[in-house]
Amino acid sequence: MESSLLASLADLEPLLTVARTYAGRLEEELKKENAEIKAYENLLFAKARLKLFLDAWTGKPIHDMLISLDVERLKLYKEDIKNLQGREVNEERWEELVQNRKTKEELILQIKGIIAKMEGIDVFVCKGCKEKILEGVILSCGHISCKACADKAIEENRRCQTCKGRIYSNYIIIK
C-alpha cells in the first residue's frame, strides 16, 4: 500500500490534469444531455398543449373555435403539430437522462472539490511545525509530515501529529 503512495509532490500535477479532463468531459456530456432533455420537455409540453386544445374543442363548431383563437395562438398550435409529426417521445430515455443529470452534477461537484483541495497546497503543511513541507515523508498511518517532525515524533512518542495513531520508523520519503 505504501509503495502506491505519492513519490513526490510533483506527482500531483498529472492527477490534477486527469481530474480536470474527466470533469470537463462530464460537463460536455451534461450539456448534450441537457439539450436532449430540453427537446424532450418541449415535445411533451407541445403534446400536452395540443391535447388540452383538442379536449376543449371536441364536439364544438369549428367556427366558434376559430373566432376565439388569435393568429399567434394558431401559429403556436401549427408549430406544435409540425414538431410532433413523426417524432415520438421516448419517456424511458427522458427519465434516464433526468436521473443521470443529477448524478453527473453531483460527481462534477465532488471532482471539482477534490481538485480545489489538491490545488490548495495547505494540504502539504506540516501539522507539527506548521511550515510548508520541503522534505516530506508519508507515515505508516498515511499522513504527510516533514522529515524533521516525523523523526522527532518517532523518537518521542511514536504518535502521528495528525491522527495520534501509532507510527513506525519505516516511512516513505517524498521530495
Image: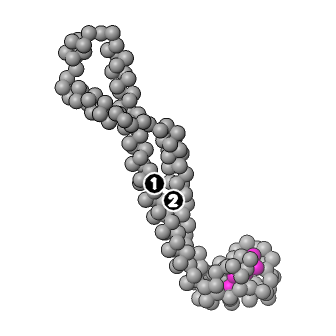
Q: Main secondary structure of the magenta part?
A: loop
Q: Is residue 139 magenta?
A: yes
**Which amino acid lies under the numbered mark 1 shown in the image of this protein?**
Leu
Query: Closer to the N terminus: mark 2 or mark 1?
Result: 1
Query: Which picture quadrant has residue 41?
Result: top left
Residue found 41% across the figure and 40% down from its top: 40
Crowdedness near tag 1: few (<14), some (14–19) or many (≥20) residues, C-alpha within 10 Å: some
Q: Position of residue 106 (x, y in %)?
A: 54, 54
* Left or right of residue 15, residue 42 in this image: left
In this view of the protein, can residue 122 be seen by the observer? no
Region of the chain picked out in magenta, as a range: 137-141
Is disc 2 in contact with disc 1, using a CB cutoff of under 8 Å? Answer: yes
Choose top left, top right, bottom left or bottom right for residue 152.
Answer: bottom right
Which residue is rendered at x = 81% and y = 77% of the image?
A: 166
Instruction: Name the residue tied to disc 2.
Output: 108
Q: Is residue 30 above or below residue 93?
A: below
Residue drawn at the location 74% of the way across and 77% of the way down: 1
Horizontal side of residue 82 vs 38, given as left or right: left
Q: Secondary structure at mark 1?
A: helix
User: Relative to the observer, which residue lies in front, 164 or 101?
Assistant: 101
For the residue pair 149 and 139, the one nearer the viewer reads as: 139
Three-letter code for the amino acid on which mark 2 is drawn:
Ile
Which quadrant: the C terminus?
bottom right
Crowding around mark 2 (Cα neighbors within 10 Å: few <14, some 14 to 19, many 20+) is many
Cα gap from disc 2 to disc 1, whole angstroms: 10 Å
The residue that mark 1 highlights is 30
Q: Is residue 67 left or right of residue 92?
A: left
